[in-house]
Image (spheres, helix red, strand yellow):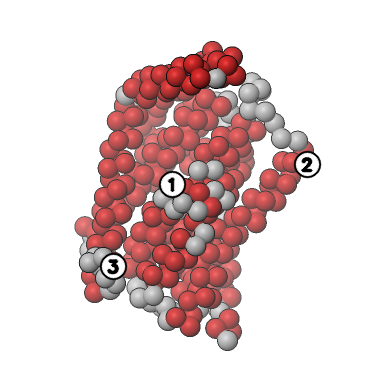
Amino acid sequence: ASLGRLRWRWVVVGIALASMDWIGGGLRLWVLARVVHPRPPLGGMIVAGGMAAWGSYLTPLQAGSSPVMIYAMRRAGVPVPKAMATVLMSFIATVAFFAIAGPLALVLGAGRSLRQHGHFLGLNLLDLFKTSMGIFVVLGILLVVVMIAPRVLSSAVHRMATALGRRSRRITARLDALRAGIDQAHDTMQTFNTPRGWLALFWAVILSGPSHANKLLAGYVALRAIGIDAQFFDVLLLQTFISSMLYFAPTPGASGFAEGLSTLVMSTFVAPVLMPVYTLVWNSINKWFTIAAGFAVFSAWVRRGLQAIEVPAP
């Protein structure tokens, strides 16, 4: 019976919102890739952004995102070392976005009503949000250090590669190529540590809003789709908290963890009888539409033939 309450115009809004995995993520990659690679194709970057989201939704801890993104960028003609540096910069932009936007929203007064809702382990919903944002602030500081001093990171990776080479003949045979790739990635990171690179990072942080729009706005759109009109900024802060926690979920696509956390947090607004249909709409916007589109793209890749990323890009 709850399905009969669906407002389909809001479901259509949700479908359009799900496309931001591709459009927003692709625009952000394009802005960053331009720093290290001449004229990266915008269409290829949009595919890479969407497929990175697809990979993250299918793997624990969203671990599949970066490998799939690098592979998709390689198919679009961006060399692997440059793609690796671009992926790292996109992650820095994501962390910076959450680390800046969350505290800024609190300073502007959003979410105060959340103090009266939810008490988990002695914390209300606003406390939980502040805790998750604190994690991103710490990560953001560490990643800025990596950007300013990339030699520290490349030296650590060199030592790790050497240690692995002592344990495996197969790795030893490829160690020279691995070292060359590490050095290229280091040089690429140095390119980002320039005024042009910092400007690109600034725009990437801004574009992280559209890139994560489906995750941040899925809750509000799903509420409107089932006929519930809640306070926009309260829902936005809760969705930001949920999205930040899903980065640490140990199951593929955060399956089970996402639904449980969403039910626990959003029960403030959604009655138990409506929670299944809310979760259906929320999950569709959040990941299922992207998963369906991603499988279509991956099937096309398989039909055309998968490429080895070790082959130099044209």
List the residue tagged with mark 2: 303
Provide the secondary structure element on which disc 3 rests: loop
Q: Nearer the viewer, mark 1 or mark 2?
A: 2
Provide the secondary structure element on which disc 2 rests: helix
Q: Are marks 2 and 3 in contact (CB under 8 Å)?
A: no
Side of 262 relative to 52 (left or right): left
Provide the secondary structure element on which disc 1 rests: helix
Query: Is disc 2 surrounded by few (<14), some (14 to 19) or many (20+) residues within 10 Å?
Result: few
List the residue tagged with mark 1: 207
List the residue tagged with mark 3: 120
Mark sitting earlier along the chain (3/1) = 3
Q: Which mark is residue 115?
A: none
Question: Disc 2 residue type?
Answer: Arg
The residue closer to the viewer here, 290 or 314, is 290
Q: CA distance from mark 1 to mark 2?
A: 33 Å
Q: Nearer the viewer, mark 3 or mark 1?
A: 3
Residue at image position (41%, 64%) is 261
Question: Disc 1 residue type?
Answer: Leu
